[in-house]
C-alpha cells in the first residue's frame, strides 16, 4: 500500500505540473521553487482514508473503464494495482492520490490528499467516488 510520503510526492508533482502548464514555457524550476503557491501547498497537512470491500477478482478487468471518468491522471496502471489522481473535495478541485489493490476476494482502496485550513474530507470523498463508480457503494 502507498505510504503518506509517496502520496505527498505524487500530489506535489501534480500541483507543480499544473503551475508549469499555467505558467507557459517560461515556468522554469526556479520559478516553481520560488512560487508562494507551491510553498503554501507543501505546508498543507496530509489526510488519508482506507477501506477494504468484498469484490470479485474479475472487477480488475473492468475497473479502468469505470474509473476513467473520475481520473485526472493515471500514475500507475497494472493488472492488480492502480494509482490515480482524482478530483475531490469542494467542487472536485482538490486532487487526491488514490490507490486500488485488487485481491482474490477484496478490493483495497486508499486515498491521500492535502487539506488546507478548511477540512474538505478530500480523501474520504475520493474513496466514496471510486466505490460509487465501481458500483460497490
Image (cartoon, rainbow, N blue to C red):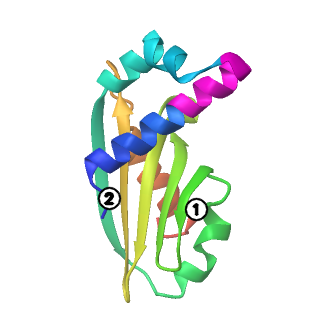
Q: Residue at 44%, 10% (x, y): give it.
A: 36
Prevalent SS, magenta region = helix
Q: Quadrant of the N terminus?
A: bottom left
Contact (Cβ within 8 Å) of mark 1 with mark 2 = no
Is residue 34 visible in the rendered image? The answer is yes
Horizontally, is 31 left or right of 9 in the view? right
User: Label 1 to label 2, Cα distance in Å?
Assistant: 21 Å
Which residue is at the front of the view, 91 or 78?
A: 78
- Mark 2, Cα crowd under 10 Å, few <14 / some 14-19 / many 20+, is some
* Placement of 82 over or under 106, stated as above or below: above
Asked which quadrant contains residue 46, the reply is top left
Look at the image and give the residue range highlighted in magenta.
16-26
Q: Position of residue 12 (x, y in %)?
A: 43, 34
Q: Position of residue 24 (x, y in %)?
A: 72, 21
Is residue 93 visible in the rendered image? The answer is no
Q: Residue at 50%, 29% (x, y): give it.
A: 90
Disc assigned to residue 24: none
Horizontally, is 68 left or right of 76 in the view? right
**Residue indicated by mark 2:** 2
Closer to the chain start, of discs 1 and 2, is 2
Please say whether residue 103 is one of the residues in the magenta stretch. Answer: no
Which residue is at the front of the view, 58 or 80?
A: 80
Q: Residue at 36%, 47% (x, y): give it.
A: 7
Q: Residue at 62%, 25% (x, y): give it.
A: 20
Q: How many marks?
A: 2
Q: Position of residue 137 (x, y in %)?
A: 46, 64
The extreme right residue here reads: 25
Disc assigned to residue 133: 1
Please say whether residue 25 is one of the residues in the magenta stretch. Answer: yes
- Mark 1, Cα crowd under 10 Å, few <14 / some 14-19 / many 20+, is some
Amino acid at each position: 500500500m502507498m505510504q503518506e510520503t509517496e502520496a505527498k510526492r505524487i500530489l506535489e508533482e501534480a500541483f507543480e505540473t499544473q503551475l508549469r502548464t499555467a505558467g507557459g514555457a517560461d515556468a522554469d524550476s526556479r520559478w516553481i521553487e520560488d512560487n508562494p503557491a507551491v510553498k503554501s501547498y507543501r505546508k498543507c497537512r496530509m489526510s488519508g482514508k482506507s477501506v477494504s470491500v468484498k469484490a470479485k477478482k474479475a472487477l480488475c478487468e473492468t475497473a479502468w473503464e469505470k474509473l476513467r471518468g473520475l481520473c485526472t491522471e493515471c500514475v500507475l496502471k497494472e493488472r492488480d494495482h492502480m494509482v490515480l489522481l482524482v478530483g475531490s473535495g469542494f467542487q472536485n478541485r482538490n486532487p487526491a492520490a488514490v490507490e486500488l489493490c485488487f485481491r482474490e476476494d477484496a478490493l483495497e482502496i486508499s486515498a491521500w490528499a492535502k487539506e488546507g485550513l478548511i477540512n474538505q474530507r478530500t480523501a474520504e470523498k475520493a474513496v466514496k467516488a471510486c466505490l460509487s463508480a465501481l458500483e460497490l457503494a
